[in-house]
């Protein structure tokens, strides 16, 4: 595999960082763009990218928080605010980054032109937005937050989208889980998987007790299965 940190030019005129891993395979392959949790492109996210590239796909992890200063807090409007807040406007601004990352991948000779979005926590909504509106070929949301605000985004989608939570996830209250359990009956391209006893952050091996190997394996399997269908 080849691992590199690159700069991507935003449509807003500035550069942002992106971790890219390309596999040691012949021919053109699909890609996955990882939309990070609030922790950004950390060791856990890089390890996920590496694992997907080891399976034969291009993996990219853009910095979705480049508009904010480093660290958990960012200064804006003369006050300190968490860098993921206000949540919906910050997610909205990141749509440009997901599009810019996809456009950067299209310049790579190994890319076959098809990519999926895989989002974690804060990045979970991009698994729905990216297939619906940003030109992606599928999405996987792992312990996604704020998804109650994006249930309407499934309308008109045909790409495979997988939503995965634990039933002990504080970011997916029972009302949201119930809302999402009903979605596959209306949208056959969507599968919803809610695992008993699993907490928020189950994908992050550095996250302590929340990490759950079986649900991690299932989520990676879903991503690889969708990627496999795009070869």
Image (cartoon, rainbow, N blue to C red):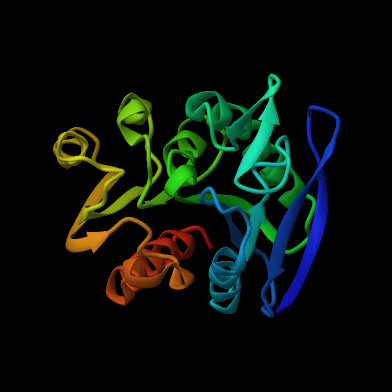
Above or below 152: residue 82? below
Left or right relative to 182: residue 164: right
How many numbered marks are there?
Answer: 0
Instruction: Residue 221 in the image: state x and y as whole percent.
Output: 37, 69
Left or right relative to 7: residue 78: left
Foreground pick, 37 / 207? 207
Q: Quadrant of residue 193?
A: bottom left
Instruction: Residue 171 in the image: state x and y as whole percent.
Output: 31, 43
Q: Residue at x 35, y 64 (%)?
A: 202
Foreground pick, 188 / 100? 100
Left or right relative to 163: residue 109: right
Q: Residue at x 59, y 60 (%)?
A: 30
Q: Residue at x 53, y 63 (%)?
A: 231
The outermost residue toward the top is 77
Instruction: Residue 91 in the image: state x and y as whole percent.
Output: 54, 32
Instruction: Residue 8 in the image: state x and y as whole percent.
Output: 80, 46
Above or below 59: residue 36? above
Q: Quadrant of residue 186?
A: top left
Foreground pick, 33 / 205? 205
Q: Residue at x 44, y 60 (%)?
A: 229
Foreground pick, 75 / 65? 75
User: In which quadrant of the rendered image does the N terminus lie?
Assistant: bottom right
Above or below 193: residue 52? below
Above or below 21: residue 152? above
């Amino acid at each position: 595999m080849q691992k590199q940190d690159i700069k991507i030019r935003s449509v807003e005129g500035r550069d942002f960082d992106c971790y890219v891993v390309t596999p040691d395979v012949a021919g053109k392959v699909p890609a996955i763009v990882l939309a990070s949790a609030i922790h950004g492109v950390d060791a856990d996210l890089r390890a996920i990218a590496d694992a997907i590239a080891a399976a034969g796909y291009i993996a990219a992890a853009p910095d979705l928080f480049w508009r904010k200063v480093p660290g958990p807090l960012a200064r804006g409007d003369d006050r300190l605010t968490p860098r993921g807040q206000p949540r919906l406007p910050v997610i909205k601004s990141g749509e440009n980054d997901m599009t810019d990352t996809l456009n950067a991948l299209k310049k790579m000779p190994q890319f076959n032109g098809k990519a999926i979005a895989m989002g974690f926590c804060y990045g979970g909504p991009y698994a729905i937005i990216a297939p619906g509106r940003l030109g992606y070929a599928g999405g996987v949301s792992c312990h996604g937050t704020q998804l109650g605000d994006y249930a309407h985004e499934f309308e008109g989608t045909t790409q495979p989208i997988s939503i995965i939570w634990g039933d002990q996830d504080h970011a997916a209250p029972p009302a949201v889980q119930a809302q999402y359990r009903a979605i596959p009956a209306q949208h056959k391209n969507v599968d919803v998987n809610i695992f008993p006893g699993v907490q928020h952050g189950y994908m992050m091996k550095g996250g302590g007790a929340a990490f759950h190997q079986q649900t991690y394996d299932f989520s990676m399997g879903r991503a690889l299965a969708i990627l496999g269908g795009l070869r």
